[in-house]
Image (cartoon, rainbow, N blue to C red):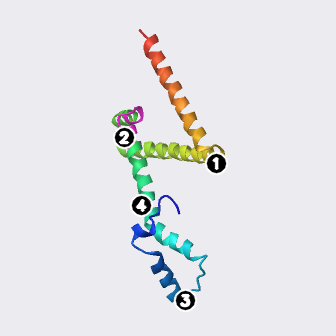
Amino acid sequence: MKLDSAPLGISGISHTEIELELEDSNDFNFTPAIAPSVQSVIADSPQKQQSVLVVFGTTFVTIFLAEIGDKTQLSTLLMSAQSHSPWVVFIGSAAALITTSLLGVLLGSWIANRLSPKTVEKSAGVMLLVISLMLFWDVFTIH
């Protein structure tokens, strides 16, 4: 059983009800070996849809909050004010953000296929630590 699927007792369908439905069906001839896979598909269907929405929502909120007030947004604001063509600036900045996000997703999936999640997690932590140390060094060396 997958971790995101509901046990039969919680999903409201008992194991015997599924077996009875499968035995009563004249359209298909299910064997006992196939019944558990059909059962997991029935139990997993709502979870998969919710999972996609949760991932999308979490990604959207995280990126949205991270991008508010950053240098990209400020640059876009200044370009829009200088050019007097806000829609052209919007289309250009949106295309740039989509392209950088695409590169990040492609690079992330490439890395995920070659490295273990623990290695990726530790590497990201080390990189963030190095960046933090560099920022602290800049703050303390500039008087």
Q: Which residue is mark 4?
A: 50
Q: Position of residue 97 (x, y in %)?
A: 47, 43
Q: Residues within 10 Å of mark 4 (few under 14, many from 20)?
A: few
Name the residue located 48 percent from the left edge and 84 percent from the top edge.
20
Secondary structure mostly seen in magenta is helix
Q: Amino acid at mark 2?
A: Leu
Q: Amino acid at mark 3?
A: Asp
Q: Which residue is mark 3?
A: 27
Q: Is residue 84 left or right of residue 120?
A: left
For the residue pair 83 and 95, the one nearer the viewer reads as 95
Q: Which residue is mark 1?
A: 113
For the residue pair 46 and 83, the one nearer the viewer reads as 46
The alpha-carbon separation of the residues under discs 4 and 3 comes to 30 Å
Q: Position of residue 143 (x, y in %)?
A: 41, 8
Q: Number of numbered discs present?
A: 4
Q: Which residue is mark 2?
A: 65
In the image as oriented, which residue stretches furthest toward the right? 114
Residue 139 lies in what quarter of the image?
A: top left
For the residue pair 97 and 17, the one nearer the viewer reads as 17
Comes first in the chain, label 3 or label 1: 3
In the image as oriented, which residue stretches furthest toward the top? 143
